[in-house]
Image: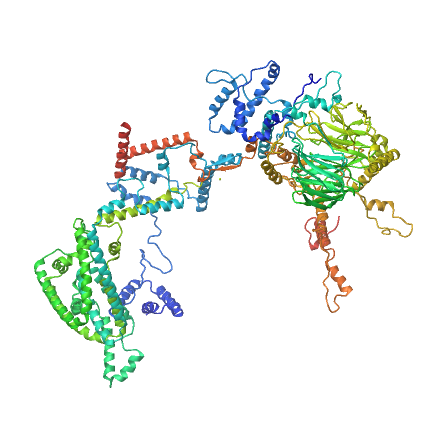
Amino acid sequence: MLSGRRRKGYPAEVEKKTCTTKMAESSEVAVERKHVENKKKAPKRYWEETQNATKKVEAEKSSDESKQENTDKEKGKLTHDEWRKKKKERTHGKFISGKTDPFPGDAPIPEERMKKFQRGNKLEVPAGTRLKLRETLTRSEAGSDLAQNQSARYDLLLTEDAGFLEGEEDEDTCTISQEDIAEAVDITSGSKYFNLHLTQFGPYRLDYSRTGRHLLLGGRRGHVTCIEWQTKNLMCEINVMETVQDIKWLHSEAMFAVAQKKWLHIYDSSGVELHCIKKFNDVLRMQFLPYHFLLATASATGFLQYLDVSVGKEVAAIPTRCGRLDVMAQNPYNAVIHLGHPNGTVTLWSPNQKEPLVKMLCHRGGVRSLTVDKTGTYMVTSGLDRKLKVYDIRAFKPLHSFFLPAGASCLSLSQRGLLSAATGDIVQVYRDACGGAPVTKPYMAHRVRGTVWGVGFCPFEDVLGVGHAEGFTSMIVPGSGEPNFDALDMNPYRSTKQRQEWEVKALLEKVQPELISLDPGMLGKVDNATFEQKHKERVEAVGYDPLAHKKFKPRMRKRGRSSAGSVEKRKNKVAHEDQRDVIRKTVGERMEKEKKRKESAKVQLKGGELSVLDRFKKVG
Amino acid sequence: MSSKSSVEAAPAVMAAEDNDEELSSLEDENVISASEDEEGSEDERKHTKLLEAISSLGGRRRMKQTERSEASLQVSEFSVAADGAGEKVELSDLLGTMEKTPGAPNKTKKQLKNLQNRKDTLELPLSKQETEKIQRGVAYKKSSREVSRWESVITQNQKAEQLVFPLRQDPTGHKRMEQVVAGWKARTPLEQEIFSLLHSNSQPIHDPVLTPVEEASIKAMSLEEAKIRRAELQKARALQSYYEAKARRESKIKSKLYHRVQKKAKRRDFLKQFEEMVKTDPDAALEELKRMELSRMQERMTLKHQNSGKWAKAKAIMAKYDHSARKAMQEQLEINKDLTQKLAVPSEDEDEEKNGDEEAGALPDFVNDPEPILDPVNPWMRGKLSKEEPEPEVEASTEARDEDLEVQQQQEEEEEEEEEEENEEEKLLREFERKRKLREDEDDDLVPVPQEEENQTLPVAGAEQASSIEVSAEDGSKITDNNDEDKDEDDKDEEEEEEEEEEAEEVVSEFNSLFNRLMKSNTTPAVPDQNEGEELLDEGLVRVQTMEDLEALRKDRTNEANQEASVPATDTPTAPESASEPPNKKKRRRKEIDLKKVLTKQATVVKVPLAPTVLEEEEEEAEVHTEQAAIIKEAFAGDDVISDFLKDKRKQEEAGRPKVVDLTLPGWGEWGGLGLKPSKNKRRKFRKKVAPPPPRQDKKLPAVIISEKRDASVAAHQVSQLPFPFQNPTQFESCVRTPIGQTWNTQTTVRKLTAPRVVTKMGAIIEPMSREDLVPKQKSNEAKRGAAILLEEKRERGKKKGSGGKRALQQKKKKMQKQKKTKE
């Protein structure tokens, strides 16, 4: 049955271990580069012919140019002629032995890949710019070009590819059951499909750690457990003897937060309660912002609170005035918190603003669930109107609207953009739900035992965890996880030592909460606020106007000299002081003008030289 | 009469210069007199001369009046008239003699002729200011040209992305040991210090066969010798200390008598010393004499011993009756006489000589000798007369000396008892000294003895010679006189002795100072001389045995010093070488928006293969309640959601819009009261409109409210002012858009993007750019070659001309050597 399907990129561990990322490779760059450059080129393939024919000229040109730039500095010692000779040799690919290089120059980089690493638009330096500016601009452009080129070139090292489930003709992939898949794949991958029957402590919520190795389960009736799910190693299992609203891993698998009936509690991985944070009460949903070390909580009282986990301080507490907040998601791109409300609106929040950054009307009914994709491009919401909507969150425009028979109660987006939606006891997974053509049927579907309470894709694994009333189900969703991981950021195979190392680094690189805004590139922009605006802000921040003119208050004098009359007199002495100068000046100007005018009139009147005897002259 | 007055006036002026009034009056007189007697000036002059002659006859000398002589017939006080002022001196007058002189070269004659023929006058030289201005201009141009050479380099360095210092880096890789060693120089102060230390300890820097220290140790004496020497030194030191102790003890004795005797002895010693000094060291004796003369001068200046003081007057009254008082006065006068006694100065006058004969007797003969001048070549500078009849003189002199000695012995006998101990010790010390000298002499045997030492040794070896030389200057007749003089001297000495017993304190102190000095010079030989003594007492490894060694060592030291001095000099750097729509319209448009259309978008129906089996019934009651409530809300208030939202949006828009400020005051300029509103004109006048804000971001998005509030928190981290080279924000933003961190880039890129602007080599000294770095190498070489060629040419020319003498010869030699080398 599965014979005709190509299964690619199943996250077999062995493969994963060998896979490397750009960053992991970075330390060996020098060696690798040499290796790559000196590597014998593979013989030409027939399909490359056409590409080469078109690109060859281009590539040569570009390579020449790049080489010129790169080698300019190195060539400092060589005379110009020598350098030219060497260049000729290289371009023509002639060696001493007489052989010619069939593929001269650097290997061309595909346009797509180049685009992937493009950052912003290239700035055209206008003709009339000053020399210094021109130099700095060209230099920075060269730098960004280099960065882009190098990154694109090293993208080659991300060898792992994601695969998908492909059905036979007239076979829906959604009809393939998990059991079938588990049987067909290798044992390790097969073992990733499992069920945990936990009927006693009610519907479960779940959270995978950022490395994807650890799973945290929180039963509504107080059952909290963390499992190293791949090895099925139980790290801890406790019952907090309270209702558990939500659970969340903190920055590493050493700690997790549990939103209990009243307060927010923090436990370590062995189940020891570390903190009970009473400032955070009636928490319903939590989100952890890993790069800011912030735990954002949404409470039943309508408060959105931010807790800085690194220092244990509440960063912000925002009264949203939107009622009970039980729908929450974060935008991994810019760390903005999305809240869903019963009136069908979704609000976007940052800790720096007391009002929502954006408020958008998404559904006619209340919002049941929402999720944002990794790149911060798409937001998927589901409402009581049984609709599933996909928004372009950058432009706040709806892209798609799907009507689901029962509506989706839980939503989750995977690293590679697969959307899981739980309707009742059925979990559906949609492929290419965001962007592209609208989908009409799910990619996969799976019925679990009870009503679904929480869904979550496991990072770096093709696994979807489903928490439901009867326990937990881990199902295989091919193509959901990112096959290539960045070991310096998140390494699923890291040791304790590495984790500790990473922790320190992450703390050092912690992003301040002030930098959270819709545009994460805000920091690189020039603040073009006017002085007035800034002054206003300052006044607001300080509470008074530091530049305000101090009001004159006459000194208290004794022996009746501080009578109302004398006080008024004294006040009058300094009254309108700022205006006086202006008045004095204008009056002076006027006087001068008048004087001039008079003088000129006199002169005109005189005409020539007047003498005393002129009065006796006869007029006419 | 007037002439007389003028003559009188002159000395008067001289006498009372400070008296201004008098002076002015006298000057007036002078003027008058001068104007009156213009014709009789000649007579007047004669007269003044006569007067002068007369006045000079008087005891006091008069200052000679300064006289101005002018080469003119008429002399006037008012103007200086050149004789024959009307005549101009012409060139021809001066050149007339030229043609007559036969020796003058033709060339100069021609030139002079040309000069004579030239009619045009020379141009007036430029004024100082102008010439200076021109010079400054030229200098400025020159220096600016010099400086502007660096411009390109500077701009290049300013532009450069990265600068690597030091500029001249040695090629990387290993060097040969010799290169490293040879190229090393002591640069830092520490290194230099260490280097100098090594030098001063004569440590080998280049490796010779033996170190200087080793060589010295080879030269050094044997153990026995060293022991003997050490014992000697020990003894000497001990004696020295005894002597010192004794001197200290003696100085504490309070007995007057004892001191008197002591003084006498000292005096005698001094005389003896002086006598000896006359023979051995005439220079020092002369010095002493000078000092004595000085004291005489001082005595002459004061009224100290002339019995004119208070004390003396009192004594004078007493003198009639008191013998002692008389004696005291006598003493004083005696002292005065003694001190003011003129020292004989040889003069041509016979009379003086005669007068001073007796006095001159006190003076030694060598006084007449000229100071020794060390110019052996010039016979005129020797200052000695030709040696005639040396033999009889010698005899005579010896006789005189013998007599002297006898007298001295007699004197010594008187105080021998007191000085016995002292003499013993002194003898010992002297013995040591003699021994030392002997040793030195032994050492000096090989070396030519310097003149000073010769002088010292000569009196020991042959006193006769010395005396003969001294006396040789005198005539034979004088020699006979000499004998008499000596006798006189002896008598005088005796007298002096008597006098000295009652010497006044002043004289004592003076004499003491003199004597002390002599004593010091006497004792210092016992405590060996500084230079020699140090070297003797210094029991270091190196022992300087010969003068050659000593000189060699000295040379070494001076060389070191020179090197030390030269090293920093060379190290010093050579060159210092651095849209919008109005809100009303929008409102209308907003009304146009269909409420229902806001959220009605065609939804695609998704077919799900699996129908949800689990219904809400299974869920808990609370959940059911909320769900149901939501459903109810959805059913009944669908439109409300939208309208609420739109209301909200409008509110926001309103809030964001700036308000019109109404400043109208009712009743001002018109009637006021109940029911009366300010007129339209007035309202229009006093309403202040604010410019409309930029269009809202959500203008075209009906279902979205975007907050227009500025985020001040990010602003604190943003760049608020455009940095320097950028002209607009986009340029700056584009420059900043690419991250340079490791998280986003490959390692090579990071390294390149974050390369430091200046790279320096650890420990390397960054020297300022030299001119050689500036000028391209080839050019500079060529230039050098060119310069060399020029030099060569010059040399050759010099040779041809035969000028330059020695230097030219040397250069020639050098060149020859070079040629030889090149040939080889």
Of residues A596 and B321, the one drawn nearer to the viewer in this rendering: B321
Decide: is A120 above or below B681. Answer: above
Relative side of A445 to B285, left or right: right
Relative side of B446 to A558, left or right: left
Decide: is B95 above or below B234. Answer: above
Q: Can you tell which quarter of the image residue B335 is in?
A: bottom left
* Residue A259 percent coordinates (x, y): 73, 41
Q: Can you tell which quarter of the image residue A165 is in?
A: top right
Decide: is B40 above or below B698. Answer: below
Relative side of A96 to B4, left or right: right
Q: Can you tell which quarter of the image residue B205 is in?
A: top left
Relative side of B422 to A481, left or right: left
* Residue A401 percent coordinates (x, y): 79, 27
Identify the residue at horizontal 70%, vertical 35% (top origin): A207
Say whether residue B599 is visible: yes
Of residues B510 and B561, the one drawn nearer to the viewer in this rendering: B561
As drawn, the residue found furthest toward the top would be A46
* Residue B37 percent coordinates (x, y): 33, 64
Q: On the rendered image, what quadrant is the N terminus of chain A found in?
A: top right
Q: How many marks?
A: 0
As drawn, the residue found furthest toward the right would be B675
Say whether residue B710 is visible: no
Q: How is the image coloured?
A: rainbow
* Residue B512 percent coordinates (x, y): 25, 69
Of residues A228 and A402, the one drawn nearer to the viewer in this rendering: A228
Decide: is A584 above or below A364. Answer: below
